[in-house]
Amino acid sequence: MRKPNPGGGTEKLPMTEPAPREMRLMRASCRRGKADCPMRGCDQRGWKAEQPVRRRAGAESPAPTRDCQSTSVLPQSLPAMARTARLLASLAALLAAAATGDARPSKIGLRHRREVGGRSAIFNGEDFVLEETDWYLLNLFRLWWHYGISFLRLQMWVEEVMEKFMRIYKYQAHGYAFSGVEELLYSLGESAFVNMTQRSVAESLLQVGVTQRFIDDVVSAVLRASYGQSAAMPAFAGAMSLAGAQGSLWSVEGGNKLVCSGLLKLTKANVIHATVTTVTLQQTEGKPLYHVKYENEVGTGSDYYDIVVIATPLHLDNSSTITFEGFDPPIDVVQGSFQPTVISLVHGYLNSSYFGFPDPKLFPFASILTTDFPSFFCALDNMCPVNVSASFRRKQPQEASVWRVRSPQPLLRSQLKTLFRSYYSVQTAEWQAHPVHGPRSPLPRFVLHDQLFLLNALEWAASSVEVTAVAAKNVALLAFNRWYQDLDKIDQKDLMHKVKTEL
């Protein structure tokens, strides 16, 4: 994601924000120097972040699918103080690490992947409505010639939204959390942000002076490539998508999946590789206790936990959803569905004639976006390896190379023949990538029960890696604040004034 630059344009948002409060939170109840202190390994400043949890119920995630069901949990058998400290070690480090200083690539042994340049174009099924060149000023001239100043109005609109969204990092740095998606959005942009979840991208852009032609040609192509949806999707999710389209996406050598595995290893958490099947509410001395059942190849198991974080979508179309028992009223699931996405990796020769280039040597593009037509694919990209050496170069257009095709449905043989003159192999992955974004009222909540939380609530407003990291940190802070009854840090109004006062 990219951060607004007051001087014009954008600058890359660093992967880390200043490590805010997690380390200080763990000192909250340290009985320093007393004989009855239950904290072992304490350096008289509180618990160390490396302390692992004793037990953790989770799910295997070998592939990028939405079928994985996982929870982040705290065991019941430890003393109360130790339970709380270990809660912070697991939740604050594991769930929020992606949004704190612990997520620096160098800290988990990763390096930024070298970018490989390539030109993009937008295809409408017959010809290219917009082509990128190697000259920045010429690109601006073409945008102005075709669409007037719509591209400037779009950029100003996106930057205004992102400037307000960036407030969340200050709020979280001071330990503030929100119990629902509506409360979080209202704290960032008041009623304007909440209304953006009910109003379409097209309606919002027309209101600020962007032309319908620009929306149909450019905005719709970006949204199809990222979400597989049209400009009729809500404006807030659309703004997040358009912000990410303003430059190259951030990646690490070896693949971005190494960020997740590296963060998990950094926490030294004890992970149970199993699929959670049931969460049952029980009461112990007036406090909620959650009985979590899970199963794996070995068999079934269960344990009791004080706090449970659900880190998987809960919606009606999810056939493998977790069962909740003993809750009155019952746990509500989100009324919605997910957008099916198919990625096909094709090793072969691109049919440049389909795109209006009979001579493949003259085909100049590495990435092709599409408008509403053709409908059988959304985007086409020439792929680079996850490790890009200094001597790497893209294959020439007439050479066989690996292309990634994003489509709403698996490609038929006839459709593959349309895009490729010939091919050696096709590998396909299909999964439920994003929610089908639409007007939703009321917005989901992070709190399902007293100490039962849903991390994925925020993705119904917008879905991206950074948004998920923000949601994870919010849940970690929310669990901590509720555990210590620090209600002044939950769902507060006028936070910008309060944060400035604290500073």
Image (spheres, grey):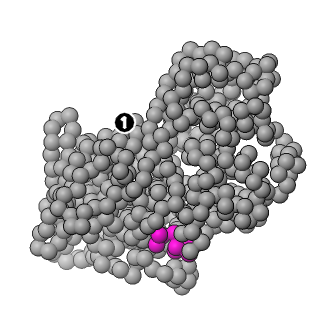
Q: Residue at x 26, y 70 (%)?
A: 450
**In percent of the image, x 39 and y 70: which residue is there?**
179
Q: What amino acid is found at the position of numbered circle 1 in the picture?
A: Pro
Picture coordinates of residue 188 (x, y %)? 55, 71
- 86 over 393 or under it: above or below: below
Q: Is residue 396 left or right of residue 198?
A: right
Camera-nearest residue between 233 and 73? 233
Name the residue nearer the viewer: 494 or 88.
494
Residue 66 rendering spot, x and y as whole percentages: 39, 43
What segment carries the magenta color?
A: 181-190
Query: Residue 28's spot in the image, x, y percent?
Result: 32, 75
Q: Is residue 413 left or right of residue 321?
A: right
Task: Tell me which secondary structure the magenta stretch mostly adopts.
Answer: helix
Q: Is residue 249 above or below residue 373?
A: below
Q: Is residue 417 visible?
A: yes
Q: Which residue is mark 1?
A: 62
Q: Residue at x 61, y 27 (%)?
A: 403
Other-residue count near label 1 (Cα within 10 Å), few / some / many at <14 / 14–19 / ≥20: few
Please identify the quadrant where the N terminus is shown.
Answer: bottom right
Q: Please name whichever residue, 259 or 319, is drawn nearer the observer in this view of the structure.
A: 319
Q: Is residue 312 visible?
A: no
- Residue 302: say if magenta: no
Image height of 93 relative to 261, above or below: below
What kind of element bears circle 1? loop
> What number of labels is visible?
1
Residue 207 falls left or right of residue 16: right
